[in-house]
Image (tube, rainbow, N blue to C red):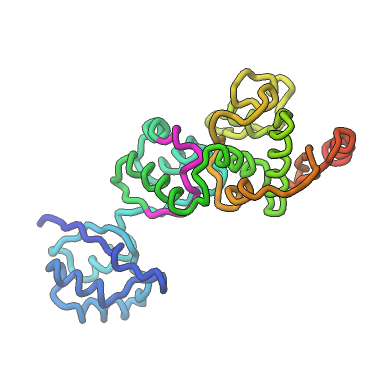
Amino acid sequence: MKRKLISTAGLYLKKFKLLATSVIANRLKQEKLIKSPLAFRLLVEQKGLSGKLQAGDFRLSPAMDLEAIVENLTHGSLDYWITFPEGLRVEEYAQRLAEKSEIDQQAFILAAKRFEGQLFPDTYSIPKTVATEDIVTLLTGTFAEKSPTRDKRTIIIASMIEREAKHEPDRKLVSGIIHNRLEIGMALQIDATVQYVLGKSGEWWPQNLTRENLQIKSPYNTYLNAGLPPAPIANPGLASLQAALNPAETDYLYYLSDSGGYNHYAETLEEHQANIAEFLTP
């Protein structure tokens, strides 16, 4: 017997973060998948599954018995949940998607690369059979909904902040330094922009850059080129976007990150060199 695709996503009660068993039972009855909503509710309660029915799309058949339908609604969603942390590049998104689905990584990269910086980091429920373009639309649509800005310059700055500031108090300070350097025409000299150029599968953000690395010819290399890179280098979260819009008022022009990811700041080159000696020299 042919299976029906039934969606429970519309029945998801965001206020309580659970599905209303009685409403689902009525939907199943309307679709002629069960005979008795009461029997469905009693079985869900008996199994202790109240509040555990998933939101998503399910392919069910009237030939299934009641227990099979309940089991599918608990574990058999045609959707999968996936989390994209802040600061990933498009290729890392593609890898995470491939771990959860049969998506073609290269096809996703080709479709999404021009939207680098606008693939909003978040947790998503995605149908397993959805087209690559629809995933890109979901990610960019969430960015348009949640981001406080769509200005390209600001997004580029936010992407660098996301890679360079691991702790919340550092975001606005790093933003302030970037703005200060841009204002006086000083090269940004941000390691993450070079890492973006050098990154490859298995090591998308290579550490311990060499002097040779810092001389790599690329418009993204902010050691060789003054001003901003031509496009974002990662996908920033809300905090970094806010920091890019609201930089700290500071006289700092330099910073470095120690082994714990904490930043140390300086106003002059001499102070910066002292920080290097204290925090980076073995």
Instruction: Identify which residue is drawn at 55% across, 52% down.
Output: 238
For residue 274, side relative to residue 248 (left or right):
right
Could you tell me residue 155's position as x and y percent?
55, 41
Instruction: Identify which residue is drawn at 56% across, 37% down.
Output: 153
Judge whether residue 57 is colored magenta: no
Q: Of all residues shown, which one is farthest toward the front? A: 183
Q: Of all residues shown, which one is farthest toward the left? A: 1
Q: Quadrant of residue 115?
A: top left
Question: Where's the N terminus, which quadrant?
Answer: bottom left
Instruction: Specify the segment rendered in magenta.
Output: 112-125
Which of the two residues, 114 or 90, is positioned nearer the viewer here?
A: 114
Q: Quadrant of residue 217?
A: top right
Instruction: Identify which residue is drawn at 25% across, 74% down.
Output: 23
Instruction: Report the number of discs.
Output: 0
For residue 178, side relative to residue 99 (left or right):
right
Which of the two residues, 92 or 159, is positioned nearer the viewer here?
A: 159
Instruction: Identify which residue is drawn at 71% across, 35% down.
Output: 183
